[in-house]
Image (tube, coloured by chain):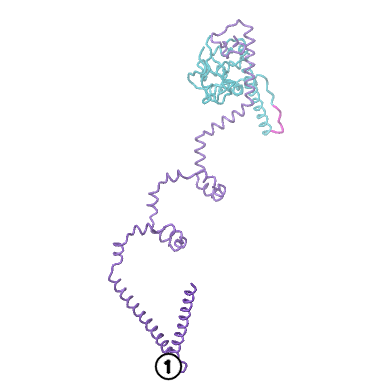
Amino acid sequence: MTGTPTREPDYHDPTAAGAAIPREARQYQGGRAGLVSRLAANTIDFLLVVIAITAGYLSVCGLLFLWRPSRFRFPSLSSLPILLIGGVLLVGYLTAAWISTGRTYGDFLLGIRVVDHRGARMRFATAVARAVFCAVFPIGILYVAISPMSRSVQDLVLRTYVIYDWSHQPLPSGRSNRLPAD
Amino acid sequence: MMMQSAGRYLVESARQIALAMARAGVQAALRPPLLAERYQPGELLDRQRARWSRLSAQAVQLALRAALATLDAVLDELDLTALVLQRVDLDRVVAAVDVDAVVARVDLYAIVDRVPIDRVLDRVDLDAVARRLDVEAVIDRVDLNLVAKRIDVDAVAARLDLDAVVARIDLVGLASYVIEAIDLPEIIRASSGSIASDAVRGMRMQTINADAQVNRIADRLRPHRRHPNGHRPDGYPPEPEDRAP
């Protein structure tokens, strides 16, 4: 665990991947993302899921109203179904984002990306496991603050990393030099 | 002396008197007063003199005619051109001619007006003339900048039928070629991304700085380990205070 993340050479090449990255941010590309960035990204993702659940709830209400307007009442849901639906939605959203682009919308806004120990896009099983882990044990992210390598509990268990990556290039599925294993 | 002068006076007077008497005698002999005028000898002499004058004029005319006829016959027999070429030094003659003066007296405009230019041009092989032209040398001698300054570009542009030009251009094909050449979708994507990131960029940089602050605080709270190459163990570049010697 003493390895140092190597800066991606393309980030500093104005003619290649680093062309759209501001000069002041290029030195951070490939570095481990810190607690604030990751918390902000996770908050945005969580809000997205909340918005999605709310939108789904309102859609169901609309359908019910259209179906029987005279007997319409807002359906009441207990906390368990909401948690289950939210969890499933969150896990599905995180998994789809990580195996496709390596970043959720919150990650995109904050300019970070989740990669596996090879610096490449996560495999499906790893992504599902990490999503479930994040949904069940969200406070594991706080370990980033005290981790020497800025890794959360999920990162330690599943050998993943969250790095600064402002580039728009897709993440390779195989081994990449974007982040060496430590 | 006086005697000699008196003698000469007397001789001169005698001569004058003699001449006057002779003149009167001749006058009286030629025109006797008592004789009819037509029978007077003077009148006869006058008529005879006029007759001789007419006869001499006729003789002269006859002689001239005979001479001209003879000259024509002689000239017909002679080859004057050959004789001139043989006998005359034409070079000396030409050298003696003031050609400038001759040219100055020539009305060139009148000559040019009489030249049938169209017929001349019809007989000229302009292609052959053009082939013999050293166009490069001509161009070298032309001050193209000066020519360009004298061109009224606005007037030329006003005469252009731009609609016809545009109609002949495959604008769709050209646009497709340009879009393909400059990778317009990528530019739009990058520019729109950069525009959107203008707002996001500040947030990203602020969170990066916040991450660094959090990590600095964490570094102070835990046992410190510095990587040999100056990078911190968490992968960040050295902070300004870390870079200080």
Magenta stretch, residue numbers: A68-74
Q: How many marks?
A: 1
Decide: is B79 above or below B9.
Answer: above
* Residue lying farthest to the left in this orientation: B77
Name the one closer to the observer, A177 or B61. B61
Q: Which chain is cyan?
A: A
Q: Depth check: A27 or A181 in front?
A: A27
Residue at position x 29%, y 65% in the image: B83
Left or right, B240 with reference to A126: right
Image quadrant in which you'd find residue A164: top right
Q: Is residue B65 above or below residue B164?
A: below
Does residue B45 appear to the left or right of B71 in the view shown? Answer: right
What residue did someone put label 1 on? B39
Instruction: Tell me the SS state at disc 1.
Output: helix
Q: Chain of mark 1?
A: B
Q: Is residue B215 magenta?
A: no
Whether A109 is drawn above or below B33: the answer is: above
Q: Residues within 10 Å of mark 1 (few under 14, many from 20)?
A: few
- Quarter of the image with the C terminus of chain B is top right
- Rendered hue of chain B is purple
- Is residue A1 visible to us here? no
Q: Can the viewer see residue B94?
A: yes
In-front residue for pair B39/A88? B39
Q: Give the amino acid type for the residue marked by disc 1 in the picture.
A: Tyr
Depth check, front residue: A25 or B134: B134
Asked if residue A72 is among those painted magenta in the image, a careful observer would answer: yes
